[in-house]
Image: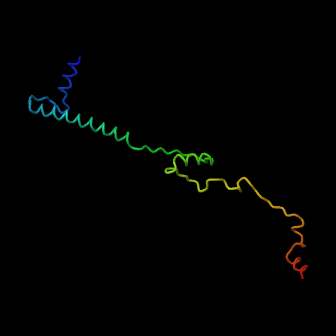
Amino acid sequence: FYELVEEKIRKFNLFEPYPPHFNEELRYYELLSTRFYILILILSLIILVLYISVIDHTQTVIIKSPTSKQYTLLYEQHSSTLLCRCKKLSILYSKFLQLLPERHEICTSQYVTDKWIQHILL
């Protein structure tokens, strides 16, 4: 079995013309070209695999509406590459809190106005 495979490899010719010729010198150059081609192909594949394994792979992960805790954790891990599309990192207070002040009766009375106080002091 080994001898058969070895023989096939030795006679493997990618550049054999059709119909075959019987020029031995030409056959020698065809075999040499085939071996050179296969060597270059294998080297190219090895270089390609090495290059792909060495380069950095960038993966984009989008997190919609992260919590403050998530954002802090992500910032600690990926501070140089973290992008935040939002303009604000927190929710405005007006979104969940509404203030409606009510004044006490005395505060709205005419007796606490500047005019009345000036009148008393004079």
- Residue 27 drawn at (x, y percent): 12, 31
- Residue 102 drawn at (x, y percent): 84, 61
Left or right, residue 39 beside residue 89: left
| Rendered position, 69 above or below 18 | below
| Rendered position, 38 above or below 121 | above
Who is closer to the viewer here, 43 or 10? Answer: 43
Numbered disc total: 0
Q: How is the image coloured?
A: rainbow
Q: Residue furthest bottom?
A: 122
Left or right, residue 65 beside residue 50: right
- Residue 58 drawn at (x, y percent): 45, 45
Residue 43 is drawn in which quadrant? top left
Residue at 18% across, 30% down:
13
Quarter of the image for the C terminus: give it: bottom right
Left or right, residue 112 beside residue 90: right
Residue 7 is drawn in which quadrant? top left
- Residue 106 drawn at (x, y percent): 89, 67
Who is closer to the viewer here, 16 or 33? Answer: 33
Quarter of the image for the N terminus: give it: top left
| Rendered position, 120 above or below 18 | below
Left or right, residue 52 beside residue 107: left
Residue at 57% across, 46% down:
73
| Rendered position, 122 above or below 43 | below
Residue at 13% across, 34% down:
29
Residue 38 is drawn in which quadrant? top left
Q: Residue furthest top?
A: 1
Residue at 53% across, 51% down:
83
